[in-house]
Image (cartoon, rainbow, N blue to C red):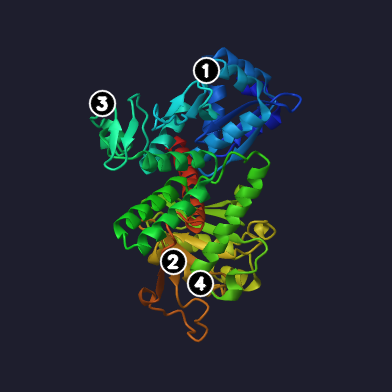
């Protein structure tokens, strides 16, 4: 019997159904008190590892697992957010076993030295194990050193700083002269991680701008950093200094790239994160509605905006399956996911497979659709008519594929008389571009289904790293993962059958 088998059934079920997303997990004792907080790039893999590798764990971790009676998960958008949230939760709850491990000095802090005129004009930023300098400012503790190093490396490319032990004292400003014991730029300069004040390449004022902006980042003042840089960019442009304006613009883009999915700051905990995530999801839905530009009455004013995404998984037509993933108000709803075992012959025709999946799903929406199905299929499954996933129509359908997949899918909507009801788009993988049929909702006079689709597509590029793009990528990736998992299951099952 494994350690997991000794736990309450509710606990076992939570472990088995943990999210496959970045985030934090909180182990609780029999009284509901949080005894340990951890973070993971993939929550389910991490929490399962405690039980799979139980005998290899440190004695303190094994004791924690022995005393764990319940567990709670908080999923976020990135490993960076998980790292910040973990630190916030540890500060808030002071879990017993996190404290024990902190005694082993496994935690790290980011140290911002204090500038001392004439002694240390270029304060360093370092990753340290303990808070030994009473004048320095510290951020942390951070339980995981490696992710923290990766974050600092990315940020250092945007805000270069010194981390060496060289003497750096500014003697004169014009011309710039730095008193140092070594004026040869080190490797960090050549990597773009330090501007080499030791070689008199950067003044104290210029250095402190990066130093203070990086400090604001760890204080959670990311928007303030961007506003300051935008002001600088405008001032450079007004003075016709377009070279510096372009450099500031690039820095703003880099900051947005590094921090796009870092919405969590030092004040966010397990309570406030729900409101934060809800706000971000709503922002993404609103952006998506605006970008798709369907008619006003087709996408807006929905109290619970439901998106369905479809993907086909197969190898040369064998063990073919269809996957349907669902998102409501920007939140993935795994309870509404559905999978389809393709019934057609084992031939590699993804278009026909997509049509079969959509036909079987949409037949439950109205009488006309069911009549169409009765005329085109030998067998009708009416048991799903009251299924909460099938009985509620989507507000938007996303097809994983380009023009061909979208055309095939739209044909089914057209034949089932749903083409003027449900907006549909395709998401192509290569350029993450969205294809939309420009004639949808404007084809009432066409009559028969004889359309030249190649001339009727509108191509839409969502803003890179926007909330809208994140939403469509996330539900598409889920459809792919869900479909592949089911396909592999069928393939393995077939391989085990006697020949």
Q: Secondary structure at mark 1?
A: loop
Looking at marks 3 and 2 on the same chain, the residue that comes earlier in the sequence is marked by 3
Residue at image mark 3: 182
What residue occupies the far bottom of the structure in this picture?
445
Q: In x, y percent, where is residue 70?
A: 69, 28
Badge number at residue 406: 2
Q: Do the numbered discs 3 and 4 sit on residues whose CB atoms are within 8 Å?
A: no
Q: Residue furthest right?
A: 31
Which is more N-terminal, label 4 or label 3? 3
Alpha-carbon span between mark 3 and mark 2 = 63 Å
**Mark 3 vs mark 1: in front:** 3
Instruction: Calculate the distance from the C-alpha at mark 3 to the C-alpha at mark 4.
Output: 60 Å
Residue lying at the far left in this picture: please name it.
Answer: 184
Where residue 334 appears, as percent x and y from the top left, is: 60, 48
Marks 4 and 2, the one that precedes in the sequence? 4
For label 1, the residue is 105
Q: Indicate whether 329 appears above or below 34.
A: below
Badges 1 and 4: C-beta atoms under 8 Å apart? no
Residue at the spot of label 4:
293
């Amino acid at each position: 019997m494994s350690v997991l088998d000794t736990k309450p059934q509710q606990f076992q079920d939570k472990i088995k159904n943990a999210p496959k997303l970045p985030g934090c997990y909180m182990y609780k004792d029999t009284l509901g008190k949080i005894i340990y907080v951890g973070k993971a790039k993939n929550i389910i893999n991490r929490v399962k590892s405690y039980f799979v590798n139980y005998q290899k764990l440190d004695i303190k971790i094994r004791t924690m697992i022995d005393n764990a009676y319940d567990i709670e998960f908080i999923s976020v958008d990135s490993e960076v957010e998980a790292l910040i949230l973990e630190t916030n939760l540890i500060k808030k709850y002071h879990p017993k076993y996190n404290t024990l491990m902190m005694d082993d000095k496994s935690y790290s802090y980011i140290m911002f030295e204090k500038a001392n005129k004439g002694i240390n004009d270029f304060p360093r930023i370092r990753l340290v194990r303990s808070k030994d300098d009473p004048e320095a400012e510290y951020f942390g503790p951070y339980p995981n050193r490696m992710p923290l190093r990766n974050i600092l490396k990315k940020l250092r490319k945007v805000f270069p700083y010194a981390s060496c032990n060289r003497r750096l004292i500014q003697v004169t400003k014009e011309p710039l002269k730095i008193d140092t014991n070594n004026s040869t730029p080190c490797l960090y300069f050549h990597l773009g991680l330090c501007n080499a004040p030791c070689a008199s390449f950067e003044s104290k004022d210029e250095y402190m701008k990066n130093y203070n902006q990086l400090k604001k980042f760890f204080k959670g003042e990311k928007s303030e950093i961007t506003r300051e840089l935008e002001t600088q960019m405008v001032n450079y442009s007004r003075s016709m200094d377009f070279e510096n304006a372009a450099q500031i613009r690039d820095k703003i883009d880099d900051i947005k790239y590094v921090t796009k999915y870092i919405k969590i700051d030092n004040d966010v905990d397990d309570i406030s994160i729900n409101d934060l995530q809800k706000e971000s999801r709503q922002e993404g839905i609103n952006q998506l509605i605006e970008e798709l530009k369907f008619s006003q009455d087709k996408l807006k004013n929905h109290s619970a905006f439901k998106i369905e995404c479809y993907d086909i998984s197969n190898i040369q037509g064998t063990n073919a399956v269809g996957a349907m993933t669902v998102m409501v108000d920007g939140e993935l709803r795994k309870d509404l996911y559905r999978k389809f075992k393709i019934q057609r012959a084992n031939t590699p025709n993804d278009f026909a497979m997509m049509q079969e999946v959509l036909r079987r799903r949409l037949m439950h929406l109205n009488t006309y659709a069911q009549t169409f199905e009765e005329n085109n299929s030998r067998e009708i499954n009416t048991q799903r008519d009251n299924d909460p996933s099938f009985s509620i129509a989507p507000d938007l359908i996303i097809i994983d594929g380009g023009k061909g997949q979208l055309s095939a899918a739209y044909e089914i909507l057209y034949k089932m008389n749903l083409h003027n009801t449900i907006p549909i788009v395709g998401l192509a993988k290569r350029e993450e571009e969205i294809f939309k049929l420009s004639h949808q909702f404007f084809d009432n006079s066409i009559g028969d289904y004889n359309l030249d689709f190649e001339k009727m597509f509108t191509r839409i590029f969502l803003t890179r790293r926007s909330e809208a793009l994140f939403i469509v990528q996330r539900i598409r990736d889920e459809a792919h993962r869900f479909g592949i998992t089911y396909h592999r299951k069928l393939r393995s099952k077939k391989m085990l059958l006697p020949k």
